[in-house]
Image (spheres, helix red, strand yellow):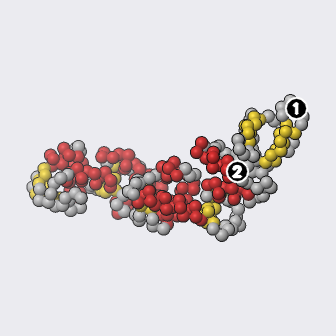
Amino acid sequence: MGTWHGTARLSYIPNTELARLVFEKPMPLLFGQRLAMIQKGGSGLQHGAEVVWTDYIFGYQKRRLYDVLNNLPQQLQPESQRQMLLVLQGYFECHEVDFKPLEQQTFIAPFCFDSQWLANISLQIETLLNAGISMASAELCSRLRINDAVIELIMQRLKQQDKVHLSYGKWCSGQGDNEDDLPQVALDILHQIRQFGKAGLELNKVKITGGKKWLRQLSHQKYITALDENIYFDMGVYLALVKAVIADHQPHDRISMTDIKDRTELSRKYSIPLANRMEKDGWVKRDNDERIILKAWQ
C-alpha cells in the first residue's frame, strides 16, 4: 500500500472473491486503493487486492453487501463506488459543487438518491404515519435502517409536500404546524413549558429576552394556552385536563370546583384559571359556584 507496510489478519469470505483485513491499528483507506499482501515472515506476494469497503458491517447487511461487492467490475472505476452504493442502499453522499444527477436519480444536497428507491421509502414512511403512528426521526432511522441525515432530508421533503408535519418532536401524517419551523428561542420556551407539565409556566419564570412576545406567539399558534395573564400550559396538557374535567359528562350536566380540583389534581391557584379558560373556550358556563357543561368530550 504505497510505501507503508504493517500487519493485518486476513480472512476469506466463503463463496466470494472477497476477503476481510483487520489491521492492528486503524488505517485511512480509500475505495479502490490497491494492496499487496505478503505472508508474515515470508517474502513472496500472496495476494493483490483493491479496497471496496471500510465501514462497519451490521449483521443484517452482510449477505446483501457481499453479493453487491462480489459483483463489482474487475476493473474498478471512479464511478464504481457510487453505483455500488445506489444498488446497496439507494443513495450516496456527494459534495461536488457542479454535480449533475443522472437519469433516474434525484439529488437533494448532499445526497444523490436512486429515484425509485426514494419513492419507495417515502411511501413506506407515509404508510407508517397514515396508520396513526407518530414517530421521531430516530425511530424512523431504526425502523428503516437508514442514516439519520438521510431520514431528515426525506422528512423535510415530505413536509414541503404537505404530507407530514412535526408535532411534539414526532412526525405525523398530513398537514399541520411544524415545530421545527419555530425560531430557537420559541422552541426553548416551548420545551420549558412542556417540562413543567401540569405545574405550568409562570410568566416571572421566563428569563429569555423577548419571552413575553414569544409566549403570545406560541399561544396564537395553539402550541400553548394561557390560563390567565401569568400561567401558561402546553396545549396537550391543557386538553388532557379538559378531558379529565368533562369525562363522561353530557351537555347541561353540572360540576363543582371541588370536582374540577379532584379530577385534575390541581391546586386552587391553577384550577380556577383552568375553569375560566374552559369557559372562554366554550366547554363550560359558570353558574354561581358551579360550572355547566356545554359540550361533551369527543
Number of numbered discs overlaid on the protein picture: 2
Residue projecting furthest to the top: 41
Q: Work out which quarter of the rendered image holds the N terminus and state it.
A: top right
Image coords of residue 231 (percent x, y) = 30, 52
Mark number displayed over residue 69? 2
Residue projecting furthest to the front: 15
Q: Residue at x 30, y 46 (%)?
A: 198
> Which SS class for mark 1?
loop
In the displayed structure image, the side of residue 230 where residue 155 appears, left or right: right
Asked where in the image residue 295 lies, by quadrant, the reply is bottom left
Q: Residue at x 61, y 47 (%)?
A: 61
Q: Which numbered disc, 2 or 1, marks the residue that appears first in the sequence?
A: 1
- Examine the rendered structure and indicate whether residue 265 appears above or below residue 150: above
Of residues 86 and 5, the one drawn nearer to the viewer in this rendering: 86
In the displayed structure image, the side of residue 287 where residue 210 appears, left or right: right
Residue that carries the numbered disc 1 in the rendered image:
42
Image coords of residue 124 (percent x, y) = 49, 58
Q: Work out which quarter of the rendered image holds the C terminus and state it.
A: bottom left
Q: Residue at x 23, y 50 (%)?
A: 244
On the question of residue 204 being in view, the answer is no
Image coords of residue 145 (percent x, y) = 55, 50
In the displayed structure image, the side of residue 124 where residue 133 appears, left or right: left
Mark number displayed over residue 203? none
Give the amino acid type for the residue marked by disc 1 in the picture: Gly
On the question of residue 245 being in view, the answer is yes
- Callout 1: few (<14), some (14-19), or many (20+) C-alpha neighbours within 10 Å? few
Q: Residue at x 37, y 50 (%)?
A: 193
